Image: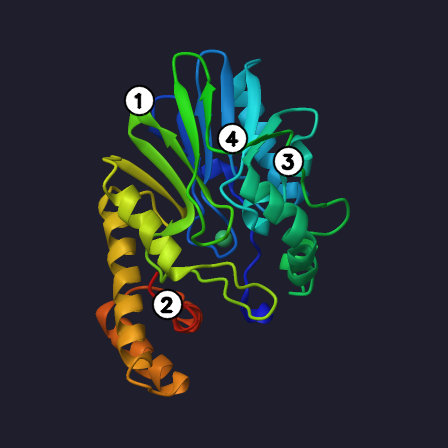
Amino acid sequence: MNAPLLPDPAVHVDGVQEIAPDLLVIPNRGVQLVPNIGIIGGTHAVLVVDTGMGTANAEQVLSLASTVARGRRLYLTTTHFHPEHAFGAHVFDGHATYIANRAQADDLKTKGPGYLEMFRGFGSPVADRLDGDVRVPVPDVVHDDGYTLDLGGRTVRLRPTGRGHTKGDQVIEVPDAGVLFTGDLAEAGQFAIFPWFPPHDTDVSGIGWLAVMERLADNGHRVVVPGHGDVDGPQLLADVRDYLRELRDETWRRRDSAMDEGDVLAEVRALLVERHPEWEGREWIEKGVGCLCAEHPA
Ligand SMILES: [Zn+2]
């Protein structure tokens, strides 16, 4: 995360795509720190999935969602607490009911302020997006084991997955359309993002994440909206699962033969870059190896 290299994380709502009837995705267009954002409609309500980072981005998303809703009630949910996914939710205050899972609400409360501080330290243009009235959001409704939201003729399921990319990930399923929003549990065209920042943040779990992907890959979703990267099919879930297996197996094999962690990192990185030469975000391999070096079979 080298601040000067980060582009402006601007959401472009004019690129919105209808991936199923009354189901829109504002694509991230390959820009770092811009998530894919969903707008899911039923006959009497509309659910927004993720906000983009900061006030100006979220205002655009709310404006589009309100136009699309044409008077239908608005709901908001976020896939996890990271700033580009959730730190626009304050804009929805008074306009939408914000629903999140308990573990994510806890992440927002305990880790949100530190992440706001960290991202404000990235300098322009990322810090500019978090200027002014941006604050860590507090969900209106918190669920423990999942939430079924009836939008009218369409039911959406908010499912906490257990610890993976963060402690509080949840996925959003739209069963009638076969669509799954994964948040950062899956990314297209890049290495899995491991927010492994010891000693400040060590909540990501390679083992937990792999277990989540093993379940998701078997669930028969037809369309997968990743946290970042192009909308894809179910193969994306299998690809992420397989990558996490590779990362785990290659890391553990070397660690368990008493290899020095620096050598483990260099070898695993070289191997995975060779296997996935087209993927971006190679810096995340190092974080993934670090995370898995600290984990052990259950
Ligand atoms: Zn994330």
Which of disc 3 and disc 4 is earlier in sequence?
Answer: 4
Residue at the limit of the structure toward the right, as seen here: 132
Is the residue marked by circle 4 packed among few (<14), some (14-19), or many (20+) residues within 10 Å? many
For the residues carrying marks 4 and 3, which lies nearer the camera in this image?
A: 4
Q: Amino acid at mark 2?
A: His
Seen at 57% across and 22% down, the residue is 74
Q: Amino acid at mark 1?
A: Asp
Per the model, the C-alpha gap separating discs 1 and 4 is 17 Å
- Whether the residue carrying mark 1 lies under 8 Å from ligand 1 is answered with no
Q: Which numbered marker is on residue 96? A: none
The residue that mark 3 highlights is 59
- Where is 27 relative to 5, above or below? above
- Label 2's element? loop
Residue 270 or residue 202, whichever sits in front: 202
Which of disc 4 and disc 1 is earlier in sequence?
Answer: 4
Is the residue marked by circle 2 packed among few (<14), some (14-19), or many (20+) residues within 10 Å? few
Residue 45 as seen in the image, left or right of residue 92: left
Q: Which numbered marker is on residue 48? A: 4
Which of disc 2 and disc 1 is earlier in sequence?
Answer: 1
The residue that mark 2 highlights is 296
Q: Does any portion of residue 135 appear in the rendered image?
A: yes
The residue that mark 1 highlights is 176
Residue 110 or residue 234, whichever sits in front: 110
Q: Amino acid at mark 4?
A: Val
Per the model, the C-alpha gap separating discs 3 and 2 is 44 Å
Q: Amino acid at mark 3?
A: Glu
Is the residue marked by circle 3 packed among few (<14), some (14-19), or many (20+) residues within 10 Å? some
- Label 3's element? helix
